[in-house]
Image (cartoon, rainbow, N blue to C red):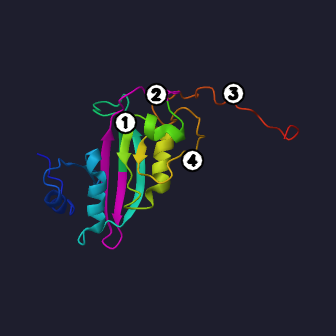
Amino acid sequence: MPDAVQHRAFTPLKAEFPDVRLLVGQFRDMTTVVVPREKIVAVCTFLRDDAVLGYNMLFELNGVDYLNYPGAEHRFAVNYGLLSIPKNNRLWLKVFLDPSGPTAPGCAPRDEEIFEKGDGGLKIDSVYGVWPSADWMEREAYDMFGIIFVGHPDLRRILTWSSFGSYPLRKDYPLRGVGERENYKIVTRDSA
């Protein structure tokens, strides 16, 4: 019989959110709590402000695409790595997202239209207000996976251009791209 996962954040989290279903897992001494998307800001704010826990740093935020992953029930996830510096304690949060429309290359709206025309299944509240360090990490997850962080003060691409039309770290994106290299205008010294 497997041992029950123990972490100092469980009891306070269960007490603060008794009606929220929080799933817990552990792998290689890293504990992950799966949080419903609509509760991510409330859970993060509690973990930061609680005097005992004091997770005062968001050290990692990334996206994951589970397309064709064996046993996966959801398509995308957002991982949040939290650290309590005074207590030297880490905790991972995970939120699962499922797109409501097609995810193939070329179906992405421009940055200016992303909040109105973006996939509602890939929208999640931004934790920028809890930890300002989420700024560029949320922008990278948006740029690479198309995860839309509602309430982010400057959600735009940082590695590709606004009219790129796709998200390159999605698993349904072709390895050779969709013509970016072939159609890219080469500027030489003589033509510059």
Q: What kind of element bears circle 3?
A: loop
Residue 150: numbered disc: none
Crowdedness near tag 3: few (<14), some (14–19) or many (≥20) residues, C-alpha within 10 Å: few
Looking at the rendered structure, the kind of residue marked 2 is Asp
User: Which stretch appears magenta?
Assistant: 80-107
| Distance from Cα at disc 4 to Cα at disc 1 | 22 Å
**Residue mark closest to the camera, 2 vs 3:** 3
Image position, residue 33 (x, y; %): 25, 51
**164, above or below 56, in the image:** above
* Disc on the earlier residue, 2 or 3: 2
Q: Are marks 4 and 3 in contact (CB under 8 Å)?
A: no
In the foreground, 71 or 100: 100
**170, above or below 56, in the image:** above
Quarter occupied by the N terminus: top left
Q: Is residue 56 magenta?
A: no
Residue at numbered disc 2 = 172
Residue 120: numbered disc: 1
